[in-house]
Amino acid sequence: MSKPYDATTRKLIEMGPLAWLKFLGVTITDPDQVQVIDSNLSTVSAEADRVIRIGGLRPWIEHVELQAVRDARLADRVQWYNTLLGYQYAVPVHSVVMLLRPEADGPELTGTFERQHSAAGRYLWFQYNVVRVWQQPVEGILAAGLPVLPLAPVSDVGKMTMPEVLMAVSERLIKEASLEQAATLWAATHMLMGLRYSEQQVAQVFEGVSAMILGIRGIEESSVYQGIIAKGRAAEGRDIVLRLGKKKFGEPRPGVQAKIDAIDDLSRLNTLLERILDVSSWDELLASPGT
């Protein structure tokens, strides 16, 4: 899946692994035994999306793989991660694939994966669960734990309108979430909504309901909220610099692209935009004025 959704959904699972396990139908008898553990399988340069360890007398792992784009080898990859996790932590591993939109689905995602040999027949059989979020009733998601709420706009909303869905999310955040949690979850809701609707549609809907989240007193002063706004503006600024620069200077070299991608300072981005008309190359644009 693309990086923004990847980071966002991983963060949501970190915020409340118990809420996600409950949403996935996993029965937990001792909540104190649940923890998110390292998902980096560094020995083979692989990293699963999120890995939750359930301790106790018979510990096991719930492996959650989130997907927003089509991957014809997804089942193969999930089986690979499952085997690596089982070997690394020496406990049973259960894998679940969460498809965030229909575009990520495919006929090969049946819940089982197998390999066959022309001479020996089937030599590997692996079972996993598939959750298609757009088929999940929105009522269940709105009643789930706070970290699951951002899935509401991409679930089966039924007869509810999108403003009504966002209102329901907002009401729970106002009642139950801390200032920092509310800022993070509202931003995640905004981002995941982009999986189903165009940028223009998302902007129109959120413009009509954005005042709701400001009902959480002081959220506009939250460092998380301000950080989200700043990052969004910086990303937009970088995109404008690249688009205008490409028209004037042509495609940037990888090194130039990396330098621009690393700029988070809005004043620096504004300076670059002002200088584009006055310089003749990417190198001259990125050089300090006067050099």
Image: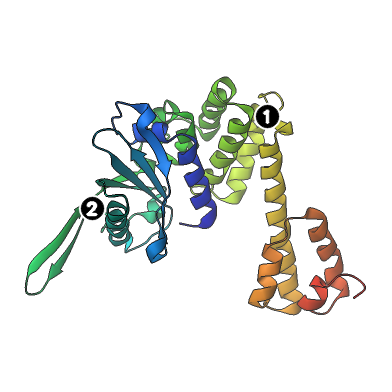
Q: Residue at x 86, y 64 (%)?
A: 274
Quadrant showing the C terminus:
bottom right
Taking the view exactly as shown, the residue that stands out farthest to the right is 290
Residue 254 placement (x, y as % from top left): 63, 75
Residue drawn at the location 37% of the way across and 34% of the way down: 34
Q: Amino acid at mark 1?
A: Ala
**Is residue 28 shown above or below 245?**
above
Q: Which residue is painted at 90% across and 70% down in the image? A: 289
Quick one: quadrant of the N terminus? Answer: bottom left
Q: Nearer the viewer, residue 115 or 235?
A: 115
Q: Position of residue 8 (x, y in %)?
A: 52, 46
Left or right: 4, with 32 as reference point: right
Q: Where is residue 20 shown, x and y percent of the image?
A: 39, 35
Q: Which numbered dot is residue 211?
A: 1
- Residue 9 percent location from the top left of the image: 48, 45
Residue 158 appears in view: no
Residue 176 marker? none
- Say the numbered circle drawn on residue 110: 2
